[in-house]
Image (cartoon, rainbow, N blue to C red):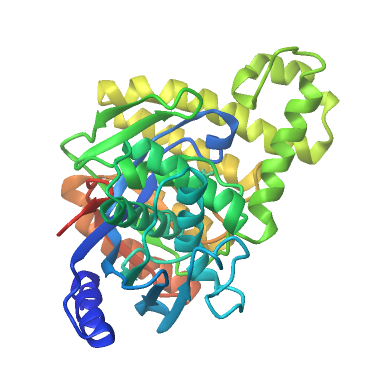
């Protein structure tokens, strides 16, 4: 059953009436600029046609009751229990409930209201697959509370509140990319975001190109230390390099030439992490004009370099992602393939000649399964609009 229907039906069963509202927020896929958002770099995501859906109504007390269909679980919290990350009964919130509770917390911190709701959520964004299921939950609740609270905020501001929830409440030190893409997505467009100025522009997806997402079916857990550790390594690199390059604020400010000149000053592991970032920022700078000119062949080559760098320097790939990329690159019609999102599992993104997309997907699936014994999910993805009320 489609999640929109699922949340509506579950709401009726659980709360004995129709939900007053329905909202959705999409996941995202990122084409280029990986692990650079928290280094003030440039990212190139699109919101995808998979989303988290919420059916909801205003509650008649100060207690929010949430039912997560995907976990077959219920959780309830109140404004008093939220700061301690507790349920209304005083026990700790389960992990999935920390995302909505974190959004409520960030809203209250910003003096915005988050009126208690009865709500049911369900998603067809696979979890832990690098497609930002967490950000889609956060942005769906931000939209829902905006509706119930009667306040409005520009989508970018909602994204920033979602990021704050994830950084300070859930404990993942993520950048702004995922919440931004989920909040600001535009149908059929790529979003180019400067993560320092937060200025962004829309770029067309070339007519004859399909974005294919290939899910290795291996899952990650972002809250595990891998992500946060790498972010720390980048911060450490800035600290050391700033002794030689006064005034730098982030790795974005370090040119490839300067980095090569100074890299001996960095411990080996920190150098590898930082080199990925410095070169990835440079790659995005080179890639954007290519995309604007419609030079997808060259752009695809840059995606390939990005994957190699995530694999060898940033070390967030896994064998299954490498196999998926390797097979994709051997298939006709493929311009570029690489892991998308944080890594450690999850999906690859592929740019494929539109007319070849169906056969590409079928062959990728069967060859991947033959090599790994795992059944992947592969689909042609359509860039979609950002988080919004449906009803
Ligand atoms: C996760 C984070 C993002 C970004 C990517 C890697 O998705 O939430 O902020 O850092 O990883 O590019």
Determine whether, in the image, residue 354 is placed left or right of residue 256: left
Determine whether, in the image, residue 5 is placed left or right of residue 248: left
- From this view, report whether residue 72 is shown above or below residue 151: below
Q: Quadrant of residue 116?
A: bottom left
Q: Residue furthest front?
A: 61
What x and y, as percent, mark residue 268? 81, 37
At 45% from the left edge and 65% from the top edge, which residue is drawn? 216
What x and y, as percent, mark residue 310? 58, 44
- From this view, report whether residue 273 is shown above or below residue 226: above
Front one among 53 and 202: 53
Front one among 124 and 312: 124
Asked if residue 349 can be seen in this view, the reply is: yes
Q: What is the count of numbered marks?
A: 0
Asked if residue 339 can be seen in this view, the reply is: no
Front one among 142 and 303: 142
Work out which quarter of the rendered image holds the N terminus and state it: bottom left
Q: Quadrant of residue 257?
A: top right
What x and y, as percent, mark residue 309? 59, 40
What x and y, as percent, mark residue 208? 17, 39
At 23% from the left edge and 51% from the top edge, which residue is drawn? 388
- From this view, report whether residue 373 is shown above or below residue 24: below
Work out which quarter of the rendered image holds the C terminus and state it: bottom left
At 72% from the left edge and 34% from the top edge, which residue is drawn? 235
Front one among 121 and 376: 121
């Amino acid at each position: 059953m489609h999640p929109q229907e699922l949340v509506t039906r579950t709401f009726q069963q659980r709360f004995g009436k129709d939900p007053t509202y329905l909202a959705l927020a999409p996941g995202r896929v990122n084409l280029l600029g990986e692990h650079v958002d928290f280094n003030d770099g440039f990212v190139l995501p699109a919101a995808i046609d998979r989303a988290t859906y919420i059916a909801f109504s205003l509650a008649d007390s100060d207690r929010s009751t949430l039912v997560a269909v995907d976990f077959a679980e219920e959780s309830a919290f109140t404004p008093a229990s939220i700061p301690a990350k507790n349920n209304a009964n005083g026990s700790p919130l389960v992990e999935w409930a920390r995302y909505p509770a974190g959004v409520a917390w960030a809203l209250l911190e910003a003096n915005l209201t988050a009126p208690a709701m009865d709500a049911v959520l369900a998603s067809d964004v696979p979890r832990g697959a690098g497609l930002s299921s967490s950000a889609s939950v956060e942005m769906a609740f931000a939209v829902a509370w905006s509706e119930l609270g009667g306040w409005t905020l520009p989508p970018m501001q909602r994204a920033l509140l979602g990021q704050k929830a994830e950084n300070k409440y859930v404990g993942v030190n993520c950048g702004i990319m995922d919440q931004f893409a989920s909040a600001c997505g535009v149908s059929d467009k790529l979003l180019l975001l400067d993560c320092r100025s937060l200025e962004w522009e829309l770029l067309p997806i070339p007519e004859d190109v399909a974005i294919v997402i290939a899910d290795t079916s291996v899952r990650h857990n972002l809250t595990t230390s891998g992500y946060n550790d790498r972010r720390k390594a980048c911060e450490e690199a800035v600290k050391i390099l700033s002794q030689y390059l006064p005034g730098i604020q982030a790795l974005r400010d370090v040119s490839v030439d300067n980095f090569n000149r100074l890299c001996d000053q960095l411990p080996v592991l920190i150098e590898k992490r930082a080199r990925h970032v410095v070169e990835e920022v440079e790659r995005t700078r080179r890639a954007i004009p290519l995309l604007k000119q419609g030079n997808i062949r060259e752009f695809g080559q840059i995606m390939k370099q990005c994957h190699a760098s995530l694999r060898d320097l940033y070390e967030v790939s896994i064998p299954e992602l490498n196999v998926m990329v390797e097979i994709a690159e051997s298939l006709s019609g493929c311009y570029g393939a690489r892991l998308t999102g944080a890594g450690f599992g999850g999906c690859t993104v592929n740019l494929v000649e539109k007319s070849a997309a169906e056969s590409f997907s079928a062959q990728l699936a069967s060859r991947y399964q033959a090599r790994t014994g795992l059944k992947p999910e592969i689909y042609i993805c359509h860039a979609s609009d950002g988080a919004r009320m449906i009803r």
